[in-house]
Image: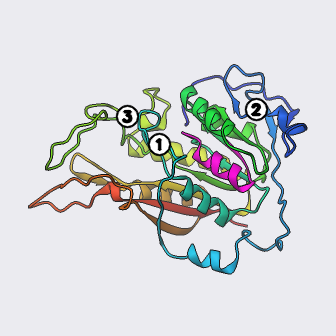
Amino acid sequence: MAGKGKSEPNRKTDCTEGGNDDNGPAARIPPAIFEDSPLHGRKLCIPHERTCSCKPNHLNCMTASQWLRCQTGVWRFSYEKRDVRDKRKHPATFPLALARQVIELFTHRGELVLDPFAGSGTTLLAARELGRSAVGFDLQEDYIRLCEQRLISEMRAGGVQVAVQDDARRITGYLDPESVSLIFTSPPYANLLNRRRRNKSRRQRKNHQYGKIEQYSQDPRDLGTLELEAYTRAMGEIFESLLGLLRPLAHCVINVPDMWWNDRRVTIHVALIEELRRRGYELRNVIIWDKTNVVNRMSILGWPSNYITLGITFEYLLDFRRPR
């Protein structure tokens, strides 16, 4: 995630290559690049061209029936064994099935996916499974190590997948303009996690999360420490810098919830829609991720006088596009 304070490196003009052959150029890019790596701050020549035989004007490799299944505006997914669900490893994850659907919908085999806030590495794993290249960035070393462990455990179906420990504000130094076919990410949700966890329910249940602050870090440059106005501005600056990395008409999908703060609904998704439009993105779709099937137990809030929808039961997938 964005945040590690560090002076701008002297970017080397030569790049580190990647490819599909484990004995060839791909071996030059490891699954993870940490701050002390000689590859840190270097341009990464990651494969990003289609390896399929689809027509040039096709958005993806899907059949008509596969496309039809994605056209509903409400999506639902289940977790699987390989998913990270332990919040002690990462407090905010999404299913591999979600990442797979987004990647399959907006890319072709061989193309490059970017996750500016890689977290536990789910986007990278889904890309590896689908034969897409992918690069993810995160501020926290622990999360990059988690990405590395997960990538090492997975067979590669094509492309290069790498997690980089660096600030999302510095991504443009790693990739060529118009080389990215999809940005897919679940960024920090403003300061949603930067408060003590209180489980409110009839059962007054407690667990290992109770009373804890689950925020990723307290670095002031971490987006998860920012209130909505500052968060929105920082997100706008980051995504404006990433716009030039996208191919014309390529998509950018951002997964966010809204939140309640001091009995007030904070509409993160509305703020981001307005900000990214202002920064040059075109909003194409708003999809609801229906999470009711993956919520363990539901709390009762506001009864009997103050009706509040349960925010844990749905999130937004904001689908933007770079104009032609």
Which quadrant holds the C terminus? bottom right
Q: Secondary structure at mark 1?
A: loop
- SS for tag 2? loop
Residue 120 image point, x, y percent = 55, 39
Disc 2 residue type (three-letter): Pro
Q: Residue 188 shows which numbered tag?
A: 1
Question: Outermost residue toward the left?
Answer: 304
Specify the label residue 214 is tagged with: 3
| Residue 320 spot, x, y in % from top left | 59, 63
The magenta span reads: 119-135
Q: Earlier in the sequence, mark 2 or mark 1?
A: 2
CA distance separating discs 3 and 2: 30 Å
- The residues bearing labels 3 and 1 have C-alpha atoms spaced at a distance of 11 Å
Which residue shows up at 84% across the image and 34% down it? 27
Circle nearer the viewer, 3 or 1: 3
Instruction: Please name the residue that numbered disc 2 is placed on.
Output: 30
Which residue reaches farthest right? 24
